[in-house]
Image (spheres, rainbow, N blue to C red):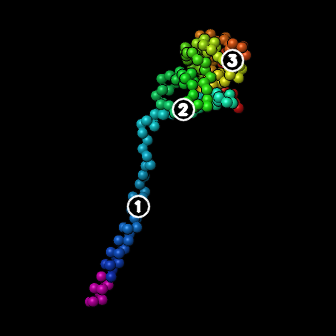
């Protein structure tokens, strides 16, 4: 009988030591290891934001470059075209970029017809422009590249005070036809 007691005590001792080692090693049940642990919750604020590309002129190279801007989606829901155009008028946030829309320019009306966006601007768009073919081209294509970032817009028709047959002061860029995004 002594042998049976010793065997039972040894088995109990093995079970106790095995149990202690099992729990100390940090083993978890299959249920615990298979469950999803989220990294971080997404806030309502993060859900309402999107990135848009606004085009401005690089101060040193004079090339047109995009500036990514994180904005609240609600700004784009009611008047997306006017909102983006106003961002262009207001200018870049990056110190290495400069705005290309002349001071005093006011948005008269913006309307999408089929896939062409008609943008009616005040006369200051022409009168206050610094001139020069590259600067004028950058002004036009800052608008075109920004607005055609929206999937429904394929071209831009610029009107001045409601008139379509206007041009910049030097006459090199006329607003007779719609402008489309250039492939580079």
Disc 1: which residue? 30
Please say if 85 is above or below 7: above
Q: Mark 1 or mark 2, which is nearer to you?
A: 2
Residue 44 screen position, x and y as percent? 42, 36
Quadrant of the image occupied by residue 4: bottom left
> Which residues make up the magenta segment?
1-9
The first of marks 1 and 3 along the sequence is 1
Tell me if label 1 and label 3 are in contact, CB under 8 Å.
no
Asked if residue 9 is positioned above or below residue 105 in the image, the reply reads below
Q: Label for residue 69?
A: 2
State the residue at coordinates (48%, 23%).
78
Q: Nearer the viewer, residue 22 or 124?
A: 124
Instruction: Give left or right: position of 123 versus 9.
Output: right
Q: What residue appears at the point 63 percent right and 25 percent down from the top-left corner?
A: 142
User: SS at mark 1?
Assistant: helix
- Determine the residue positioned at 33% across, 82% down: 10
Q: Which residue is mark 3?
A: 131
In percent of width and height, residue 45 lies at 43, 35
Q: Is residue 153 magenta?
A: no
- Which numbered mark, 3 or 2, is in the foreground of this view? 3
- Cα distance between the residues tagged 3 and 2: 28 Å
Main SS category, magenta section? helix
């Amino acid at each position: 009988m002594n042998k049976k007691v010793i065997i039972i005590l040894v088995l109990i001792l093995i079970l106790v030591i095995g149990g202690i080692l099992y729990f100390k090693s940090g083993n978890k049940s299959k249920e615990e290891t298979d469950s999803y642990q989220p990294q971080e919750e997404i806030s309502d604020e993060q859900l309402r934001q999107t990135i848009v590309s606004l085009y401005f002129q690089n101060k040193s190279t004079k090339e047109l470059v995009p500036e990514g801007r994180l904005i609240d989606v609600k700004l784009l829901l009611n008047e997306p075209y006017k909102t983006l155009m106003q961002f262009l008028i207001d200018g870049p946030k990056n110190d290495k970029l400069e705005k290309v829309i002349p001071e005093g320019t006011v948005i008269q009306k913006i309307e999408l017809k089929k896939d062409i966006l008609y943008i009616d601007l005040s006369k200051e768009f022409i009168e206050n422009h610094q001139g020069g073919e590259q600067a004028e081209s950058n002004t036009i294509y800052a608008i075109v590249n920004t607005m055609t970032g929206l999937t429904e817009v394929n071209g831009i028709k610029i009107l001045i005070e409601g008139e379509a047959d206007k041009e910049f002061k030097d006459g090199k860029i006329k607003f007779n036809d719609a402008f489309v995004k250039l492939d580079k």
